[in-house]
Amino acid sequence: MPELPEVETIARELRPLILGERLAGFRTDWPRSVRHPEPALFSARVAGRRVERVERRAKWILVDLDDGAVIAIQVKMTGQLFVLPADAPADPHVHLVFPLGSGRELRIRDVRKFARVALYERQPGGGIVGPGGVDPLAEIGPEPLAPDFTVARFRERLRGRRSRLKPLLLDQSFLAGVGNIYADEALWRARLHPLRSAATLRPAQERALWIAIRSVLTEGIERRGSSIDDYTAPGGDGEMQEHLAVYQRTGTPCPRCGRPIRRIVLGIRSTHFCGWCQRLPAAERSAGNRALLAAARRTTRRGPRWSELPTGAGAVGARPAARRKGKPDTAPARAGGPAAGGSR
Ligand SMILES: [Zn+2]
């Protein structure tokens, strides 16, 4: 699932493609993808407006128009953005289309149909509001790469948090844009166990985690994101997946100590870590943590990707045959890197 570096890459590559363009409208064959307003009104509202800004906030892409309207795009699990000539071959997985004045189209291709678009109004203070004056981003935590996100500010946010580090990093109200991939990688870099309690970190460890989060996200952006599963950017696949230390690398040697990477399941998410480099202090080896760790020792096998699961066994979207058929013309072929498959 795309996280901060992936969505940032999409926004950066989309910007030069549509900045200054006039929108000719909007259409969809899957109205549930449109949060508000309803599609016909959406189209009428954006038709003739010029694109003034393309930005990312958390995992949202925000396209500012010249009348103060803001198109918000959430790519969610499998959404892909492409800007193509209007006469480019149709793709059965494209459900959202913004025709552009120049004769091209911004197309959102989405195998699982979880991507969402909505229209908001830009506020003088910088926020966006939708129906009822609600800012959908108000509850989202700070941007980890913002210049004002200092180690002091990070410490402040950690203070009094009792949750374990992995779920805390995934909590979007704690920090914006970090998901499963970069949480696992940041904890490995900081040598912190995913089940470690945030409340017990020493100052040096807080600092190490702050550095790790920022460095792994920065590197993720420089490498244009991790093309695992369906993520790709307007300019093609990223290459961060080839530089991940632990994520989906269960059973392979830890790049630091050579011992096999382990996997545990917290909630519904897989967590990958090195049991040697990321040790849990003795005081935190509670019964609950011990049970999860025992499970980790049993699950070193690399399982199938969701897209390889037979229909019905966890796959909700299109059938594998439909996926293969729909894959090609707009999406560049994926290079099968070492981390391209594996357990989730
Ligand atoms: Zn290690």
Image (cartoon, rainbow, N blue to C red):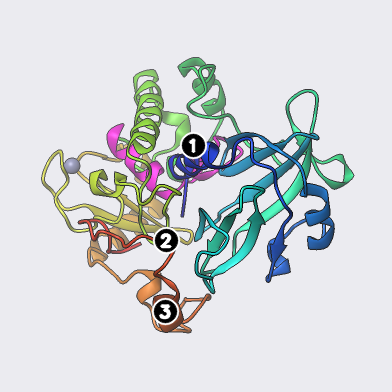
The image shows residue 249 at horizontal and vertical percentages of 24, 55
Q: Residue at x 23, y 67 (%)?
A: 301
Question: What amino acid type is highlighted by mark number 1?
Answer: Arg
2 or 1: tag closer to the N-terminus: 1
The image shows residue 225 at horizontal and vertical percentages of 38, 44
Judge by depth and name the residue closer to the eye, 47 or 255. Answer: 47
Judge by depth and name the residue closer to the eye, 333 or 198. Answer: 333
Give the quadrant of residue 304.
bottom left
Q: Residue at x 53, y 62 (%)?
A: 109
Q: Quadrant of the C terminus?
A: bottom left
Q: Callout 2 environment at 10 Å: few (<14), some (14 to 19), or many (20+)?
A: many
Q: Callout 3 environment at 10 Å: few (<14), some (14 to 19), or many (20+)?
A: few
Question: What amino acid type is highlighted by mark number 2?
Answer: Asp
The reply to whether the C-beta atoms of the residues labelled 1 and 3 are less than 8 Å apart is no
> In the rendered image, which residue does mark 3 sit on?
325
- Classify mark 1 as within 8 Å of ligand 1 or not, answering yes or no: no
The reply to whether the C-beta atoms of the residues labelled 2 and 1 are less than 8 Å apart is no
Secondary structure of the residue carrying numbered label 3: helix
Secondary structure of the residue carrying numbered label 2: loop
Give the magenta range. Answer: 167-191
Q: Residue at x 75, y 57 (%)?
A: 35
> In the rendered image, which residue does mark 2 sit on?
230
2 or 3: tag closer to the N-terminus: 2
Residue 50 lies in the magenta-colored region: no
Secondary structure of the residue carrying numbered label 1: helix
What is the C-alpha distance between the residues marked 2 and 3?
14 Å
Give the quadrant of residue 128.
top right
Q: Residue at x 74, y 54 (%)?
A: 25
> In the rendered image, which residue does mark 1 sit on?
12
The image shows residue 65 at horizontal and vertical percentages of 73, 37
1 or 3: tag closer to the N-terminus: 1
What is the C-alpha distance between the residues marked 1 and 3?
29 Å
